[in-house]
Image (tube, rainbow, N blue to C red):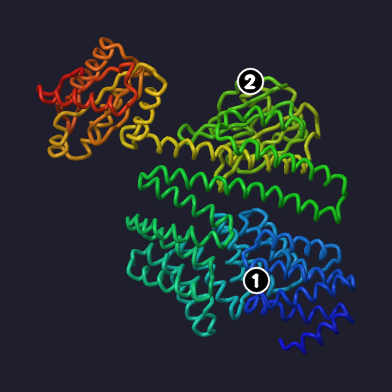
Amino acid sequence: MENNELQYNLRKFEEDENHIEYFISIFPEYIKSNPEKAKEILDLVMEIALNKEYELAYGWCLMYIGWYCFTISDYTNACKYRLDANEIFIKNNCVKGLIFSYNGLLADYTRLGNLELAIESGLSGIDLAEKENDEKALIHLMINTAIAYMDYRKYDEAKRLLNKINEVYRQIQGSELIVYYITLAEVEVISGDINKGYECCEVAIELIKELGCWIYECEILSIRAEANSKLGKNKEAEIDFEVAIKSAKSFKNIIYIVKTLRRWAKHYNRIGELDKAEKKLIEAFNEVNSLNSLLDKSEICYELNELYAQLKRYEEAYKFLKEHLEIEKEIFNNKSSSWLARLHNKEITREAKIYRELYQEIDLLSGIGKKFTSDLKIERNLEVIYEEVKELMEADVFGIASYSKEEKILKYDLFIVNGKRKNCGISALEEENFGTWCYKNKENIVINDMENEYRKYVPSRNKGIEDDNCNVKNIKSAIFCPIVVENEVLGILTVQSYKKNSYNKNTVKKLEILASYIAIALENAKLFKNIEYSATHDWLTDVYNRKEILKRGQTIIQNNKGCSVMIMDIDNFKSINDNYGHATGDYVLKTISNLMKKDIKGNGYIGRYGGEEFLIVVNSSNKEYVSVLANNIRKNIENYNFIVDSKKINVTVSIGVYNYLKDDKYFNKHIKLADEALYLAKLFGRNRVVNY
């Protein structure tokens, strides 16, 4: 835009607020092609709008400032500006502005990881666009909402929206048609018919060539590469990945550089080239730091955690799991902030007092959430949760149940009645009660008149909640809320009251937020337990790994505690592997580990020292006791029936023992001397114990 033209239109805007339409018409293209220039013009227009008190025009400026922030990956401020714009559009009943702001918030919330609010914003925009018969905006919103559903792993919902576009709105043209086929290709390749997804890729590529919209090339080639990978066309996949990255870099499209590198890593994982998968994921991790997208960074950290666990590099797996969980906590806290912002927005049209109270209570919930999501020992948190909840709502009864996949049961980890903890049994999923209904349907139960409402959920029962195995009498109101992570139900949360009409929508919302925090706390605890265990234990034998057993031994020495060290070696282990195969070797190692655990019990530590060698630290320096223990281990292994192909094979071990002396300060010395004793045991004919 020439300076004269800009000055002319700024003067026209000073004279007439409606001239904002001119700037609305030019901002989208400017933000795409020259965002910094667009920001300069926006600042000038905003200054006039403020001075002239043009409220609606100011709202439009906020909308496009939000768009500018989005292009530079400042998603937090993008969301803030568009929420402020949304507030102005509500106040002025500007439906066009509301449609635009909901579409913007859909994108902002997605990048911030708040997919629930992203989808809710998209559906709000769709509803308004349908009422206004704004087909162009409607198609745009439906496609973007479908993308949010895919990020949320709700692929059926994404397909439903895309199919609706195809059935009802057949006049899609230009770049929107390209985006439609890209989105449809992605959802089919991820969760549907890969061949159909591939066909959609081909259609999109032809449209890109025909219309010259090369900015979309990286997206579609990245998706086609994934399709080729899943179809076993590895060479074609490699070519597509390389061209997609080159194209994304030429347009500085960081989002698709990251997406493509992640897909490329999955391709290498799929074909077993884990070192190359690691390289691509590390590249993606380095790129995502400039993107400022919590959702993408969280997912990459989790993918690196899983990859390093596959590679049995548990320290690195642990590092990235910790980072993933820290980001997840930030996402959850952002969700609380988003709720607060939305409640502030609603104060415009609703009774301020109610929302001010709820605002304060949700802020309190955020504090509760931070308190117990940071503690990985979930058992310590359960009663703390109850103490906080009873301050927020009627909670004569409070319970948290977790689901066991192995046993297919719901078991209450905490059940409190009138302030006292109570054992509450278990529920098999085939049983008919409120807890199992809530779990199986992934929906809240809200009852305010038990006698008349319970049949909606347990129609075949003669009574209400008294018939559940928790057997609480005289309950009049109850809420059961599923505890969900990534569409998987981990358990249920319940509050109950002896009074009728104890709960309303606000109570339910508070409990849903609390359930979200409980879900992440449960998931954190489970993931940390698994990874921490893997970081300290040998994956095959389920005893300590070399690093951990050495660490524990050194700690005992430093604390001047008496101990003895055994080094045990399986005799002729190589011939077992050579004659019977490595699977048999693994079976022998695991069995010997289990036999040793029975002998050692709580009297020491066992670690796999390397190959077929085990290091045992015994909490005693009594030579006679330790010698007897070592011989018991040796005899139990010698007498055990190792069965391979219906035949018994002979397995024996040799053990070297060293007993602690007060002057010994270094654990490595203990190991060295026990190893010398082991050498003598081998030299004297194997299958024996030698004390140093």
Residue 340 point in image, percent of width and height: 75, 49
Label 1's element?
A: helix
Circle 2 Cα neighbour tier, 10 Å, few/some/many (<14 / 14–19 / ≥20): some
Please say if 474 is above or below 9: above
Q: Residue at x 17, y 24 (%)?
A: 652
Q: Residue at x 71, y 50 (%)?
A: 337
Q: Nearer the viewer, residue 81 or 348?
A: 81
Residue 108 figure quarter: bottom right
Residue 182 point in image, percent of width and height: 52, 70
Residue 448 point in image, percent of width and height: 77, 35
Instruction: Classify residue 672 as left or right of residue 491.
Output: left
Circle 1 Cα neighbour tier, 10 Å, few/some/many (<14 / 14–19 / ≥20): many
Q: Which residue is mark 2?
A: 422
What is the residue that sits farthest to the front in this orientation? Answer: 663
Residue 371 point in image, percent of width and height: 65, 36
Name the amino acid, label 1: Ile
Q: Which residue is mark 1?
A: 139
Q: Is residue 130 visible?
A: no
Q: Nearer the viewer, residue 127 or 342?
A: 342
Please say if 116 is above or below 513: below
Res 577 label: none
Instruction: Classify residue 630 as left or right of residue 263.
Output: left
